[in-house]
Image (cartoon, helix red, strand yellow):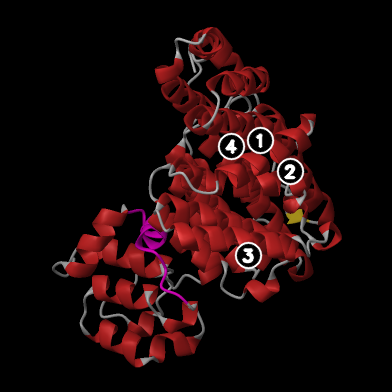
Amino acid sequence: MPPAFWLTDQMRDALATWHIGRVIFAYRTHPFHGRALPQELVANWLGLTQAQLSRIEKGPAPEQLSKLIRWAEVLAVPPEHLWFKLPAGSGATLDHVNRQEFVRAALGVTVAAVTHQPLAELLGKIEPTPIPSTVGLAEIEQVRTAAREFSSWDHTYGGGLVREAVSAQLRYAVNLLGAGCAEKHRTELHSAVGFLGHTAGFMAFDAYAHADARSMFQLGLTCAEEVGDWHLRGKVLSSMARQAIWCGHPDDGLTFIELAMVRADRLTATERAMLHSARARALAKLHRTEEAVRAVGQADDEFAHASPTNDPPWMSYYDAAQHSGDTGHALFDVALDGRFVGEARQRLETAVAGHTATFVRSRAISGIKLASLTMATGDPVEAASFGQAALVDAGHVRSRRAADDLRELRTLAEPHRQAGEVEELDARIGSALVGA
């Protein structure tokens, strides 16, 4: 933060209390950010849960020096403003602190244990890839290529199959941040590593490794904010919002979207369409129907001005089919309440028809949603036909999200099982969900 950040009345008053919780609160709500940073976001930086941070901000002043030092370092509070002394060598620059957080996040992801001991011993003999002393454009492009390839695999097959591989690649990429790099390439390096972090995070989210996903998304966000990459920042916050909404926290998702929309003028029309679609989904989950429908309209308006040549590489997936699917998902909850049923259905049908074989997971999920919507509001036999087609796509991907959508479809089909087509669909879903 700039020196003036710590000199506002708000920060000076908080620092004068000698209460780290009040300092953190003042930091989160500082006007510099444009909008208050969510507790969950800052708690993640500090290695806390949202509930723990809430107690620290509101409760008695924590006195354990090691914690005070660690939190002050993470927030990069200048030593001259603190009421305690940092240890020698701890006058960490923000860059140093961020690198420590990158490594902690990347190396802390969960990796499945290898249970076959002889094979584990063989793998233990494999030497790690050495980190170059100097990082140049070749290494940066390698990280970008890895991110693109893993992202493509994720769209086609889901996040369950190669998550360990992307985690290993992410560890290597994070270590590049500690190597020498010319200042003119520093932004590109952080953006490339952040892109890979986001890719790994979304694969973890799809596999329901939610803690890993949050750490990886946070890594990507920190990379983006470190070098002022507004495009990557918007994408990561959008995915953080989607995860929060999926996990049953639409209000947190809405907060992430509002953060992403700060200085939306710096984003492309496609990116703004993506964010409005996610905002509509959060609002629909909150039963703020009129606002959700308006947000879908705003997404449509932005997408009408989309120009793929202006978009960053990670936005290449957001085409007309993806936009129809995202806005159709947003209207799904509205349609279950009996409103805009036809509109939601039309958008989901467009998504299913438009997704190519490269985006099998998206086609499967939109197809399942189309079947669920039709099962709940239309002809169960037609819904069963949609469901059978979606099951073909779902059989090619490993996605916990798709599996849960199938469970939802099965629940909605329960009242209609007297129809032979629906009973057959129920049986096929049951078989597909074995081991899912």
**Which residue is at 67% across, 75% downward?**
265
Disc nearer the start of the sequence (2/3): 3
**Which SS class for mark 4?**
helix
**Which residue is at 67% across, 20% downward?**
389
**How much space separates mark 2 and mark 3, taking CA atoms?**
17 Å
**Image side of residue 261 versus residue 284, left or right:** right
Amino acid on which the number 3 mark rests in the picture: Gln
Q: Are marks 1 and 3 in contact (CB under 8 Å)?
A: no
Q: Which residue is mark 1?
A: 362
Query: Could you say which is closer to the camera, residue 158 or residue 15?
Result: 158
Amino acid on which the number 2 mark rests in the picture: Ala
Asked whether 78 falls inside the magenta stretch, the response is no
Q: Which residue is mark 2?
A: 321
Q: Which residue is mark 4?
A: 203
Residue 326 image point, x, y percent: 62, 47
Q: Which residue is mark 3?
A: 298
Query: Could you say which is closer to the camera, residue 324 or residue 199?
Result: 324
For the magenta stretch, what is the residue range? 35-48
Q: Are marks 1 and 2 in contact (CB under 8 Å)?
A: yes
**Image side of residue 242 versus residue 67, left or right:** right
Residue 152, relative to residue 282: is it above or below? above
